[in-house]
Image (spheres, rainbow, N blue to C red):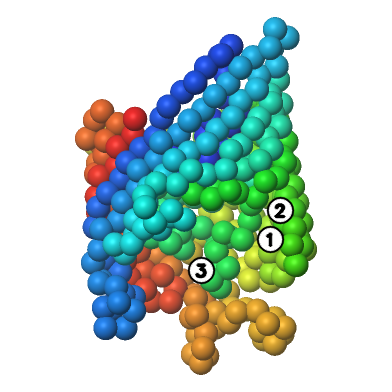
Amino acid sequence: MKKVLFATTALIATASVAAADVRLSGYGRFGLDYNDANDRAVNGVSKTTITSRLRLQFDMSAETDAGVAFDARFRAQAESRDNANAGSNASGAAFNGARFGVSYQGFRVNVGNIIGAIENMPGTYLETRTAGIGIDGASFYSHVGNVNNEFFNWDAYSSAGFGVNGIEALYSTGGFTGHLSYSTRNGAVASDRIGVMLAYNFGDWTVAAAHQSSDAMWEDKTLVSVAWDGGQFGARVAYADNDGISKFGIYGNMDIGSASNLLVFYTDEDAVSAADVLAGRGDNRDNIAGSNQNEGGSYGIHYSYDLGGGASFEAGYRRASNDNDTFQAGVYFSF
């Protein structure tokens, strides 16, 4: 399968490192984004805009005489959506927070801008270069952990911010991967998150499960996934209990010839309970005044064509559960 999931930050988390090394890598992507939720007369944004990102990644490593490896990573990223800079630095690119790691054989410990156990779970992101639909992910309604406008409420490596400044331990051997992460947020409202993930690959199959426990409201979640990679064809299913809101997804993709891949997905989000709404949680229920209307199904289709040399043409359409339509098309190239 032509599966190139560059957006998942854990891709080289357990990769081997040289005795001393500094590496530069990254990617660029740019294209057009049509979003029917935009209206210049209402929110001042045109329905069709340019979306773009340029990322430069720095990876540094050193290895002791005993074979213990130390490494660090940070990124510079310039991004624009809706013809506005999406980063924290209005003048252009912004640097993110650093992640530091130490590894020995199959065991690794990271501190700082960590990956996060939920984020690192296989079978939750799409098998596309953006890990979502289109050229910038199209808000990632395809992820079963995103419900009720409570999107990305788990620890994850931040490409444009400082991250959670947490600590995590990962262990891989054979087809097994285990991941435990912890972070704390200090301030007027302090909270802690603990995440755990287990995954096992055997032949064409990968099964995975993850759980997050948090002091913050509505952030406890449990996810499971089963994925099959049959070569030309691939399929998977995923399910999440997001602190009382269930969401499941079914996904499939196929290679078309030697250079193309077509992917489709469908997810379905259950309604929030009336008791949670009374307790202050957002409301996703259909036909309720003031609700974000995210209850129900989302679906999308994505097409990728390999142009060679690390470049590809990416296009996708997505309809969200709140009836928002987006279509994106553009070019993605890595270096």
Q: Amino acid at mark 1?
A: Lys
Q: Residue at x 47, y 56 (%)?
A: 88
Residue 317 picture location, percent across and down: 30, 61
- Left or right: 42, with 291 as reference point: left
Residue highlighted by disc 1: 221
Q: Is residue 247 above or below residue 42?
A: above
| For the residues bearing labels 1 and 2, Cβ distance under 8 angstroms | yes
Q: Is residue 222 left or right of residue 40?
A: right
Instruction: Mark 1 or mark 2: name the one nearer the start of the chain.
Output: 2
Residue 92 placement (x, y as % from top left)? 36, 50
Q: Please name whichever residue, 8 or 222, is drawn nearer the observer in this view of the structure.
A: 8
Q: Is residue 145 visible?
A: yes
Q: Nearer the viewer, residue 317 or 277?
A: 277
Residue 132, compared with residue 290, is above or below; it is: above
Please tell me which of labels 3 and 1 falls first in the chain. 1
User: How much space separates mark 3 and mark 1, taking CA atoms?
Assistant: 16 Å
Residue 112 horizontal/vertical position (percent): 66, 41
**Total numbered labels:** 3
Give me the disc on residue 268. 3
- Taking the spot 53% from the left edge, 40% from the top edge, the residue there is 9
Residue 158, horizontal then vertical, whole percent: 54, 48
Q: Amino acid at mark 2?
A: His
Give the quarter of the image for residue 41: bottom left
Compute the Cα span from label 1 to label 2.
6 Å
| Residue found at the very far top of the displayed protein | 65
Q: Which residue is mark 2?
A: 211
Q: Please tell me which residue lies in front, 4 or 201.
A: 4
Quadrant (top left/top right/bottom left/bottom right) for the C terminus: top left
Q: Residues within 10 Å of mark 3 (few under 14, many from 20)?
A: many
Q: Tell me the SS state at disc 3.
A: strand
